[in-house]
Image (spheres, rainbow, N blue to C red):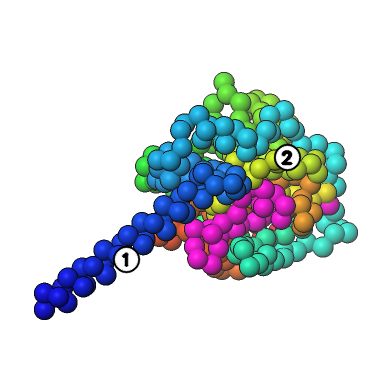
Amino acid sequence: MKKKLKSGARFLLYTVLEFVIVAALGIGLVYYGPFSNIKHMVVTTAMTTLRHQYLATWFLKSDEINNIMESNKIDSDGKYSNEDAILAFKPAVDEDKIELIDISSDKIKGYILVVSNPARVIVGTTNKLGNVGMKLDEMVKSYNAVGGINAGGFMDEGGHGSGGTPQGLIIENYKVVSGNYSESYELIGFNNENKLILGKYTLREAQEKRIRDAVTFDPFLIVNGEPLIKQGYGGSGLHPRTVIGQRKDGAVLMMVIDGRQLSSVGATLKEASDIMLKYGAYNAANLDGGASTTMYYNGKIINSPSSQYGPRYLPSAFLIKPIS
């Protein structure tokens, strides 16, 4: 009996040692091996989470981490979309339709909603803004909409936010419902001609530009047909993604990519940008991703949100109105 116990303990010890050796080799290859692209991917992914930054900080000095993050950063300062390049939707000529496209591949699982009439895309907000958010399906139903995606970010200290306190500005049907007139914001929204506007504006400037619906988030990915990621992966690693864009013909593209799951680990901002370019985006911007990434259409949640509690409570969403 003692011999069996000893042999069992020895086996367990060898198993643990093998795991430690393999883990050490893996860490060595990631952080100290010749493949800098792998290190950049791991560091940018870890440092853009709330709970897993130790995966980088345990092994690298802060200066190296900062250099990696800076080298992958997207510079969207001074970038403004040119609305004159976007064609106006003409109801008498253009077909008013919505198309759901499955963009899944062997690497990702994702979807794009193509809304041909941009006038149908609006910003919706929780009915308890400043207090508690709403799940996307609840918000869609409260606005009698037919679909939508999550939009702006919210205060989420420690990952326990209620989704009710938005970050940045929110403009809904020309009314400012969140924001401060003394600040400038990265604006993602639609003007009175239903053209997607990207740029840094004060609330007063946004009103002067006749912005009807908008939220704050970043970074911008494509401005006036030009992808802004010139090197690296975009600075935030592999995560679930939500992106909104517009083609030159005025059609709006709403994209979600699942992440943090076996079926889809997520996408880099560079990969998200490339997909939007493939589907014709002339302007595109990153929205709140991670566990917030959610798409609703045809009476159901289309994607698989990564939150263990299901779809999150949100302050805002880009919604699709029914045909009037």
Circle 2: residue type = Lys
Say whether disc 1 or disc 2 marks the residue closer to the N-terminus: 1
Residue 173, relative to residue 271: is it above or below? above
Badge nearest the viewer, 1 or 2: 1
Q: Are marks 1 and 2 in contact (CB under 8 Å)?
A: no
Report which quarter residue 240 is drawn in.
bottom right
Reading the image, the residue beneath label 1 is 15
Is residue 256 on the magenta stretch?
Answer: yes
Q: Residue at x 72, y 28 (%)?
A: 78
Q: Nearer the viewer, residue 272 or 206?
A: 272
Report which quarter residue 117 is drawn in.
bottom right
Please report the bounds of the magenta region as a residue range: 249-275
Circle 1: residue type = Thr
Q: Nearer the viewer, residue 179 or 22?
A: 22
Reading the image, the residue beneath label 2 is 230
Task: State which quarter of the image contains the C terminus.
Answer: bottom right
Return the x and y of residue 303 as percentages of the image width and height: 56, 64
Q: Is residue 148 visible?
A: no
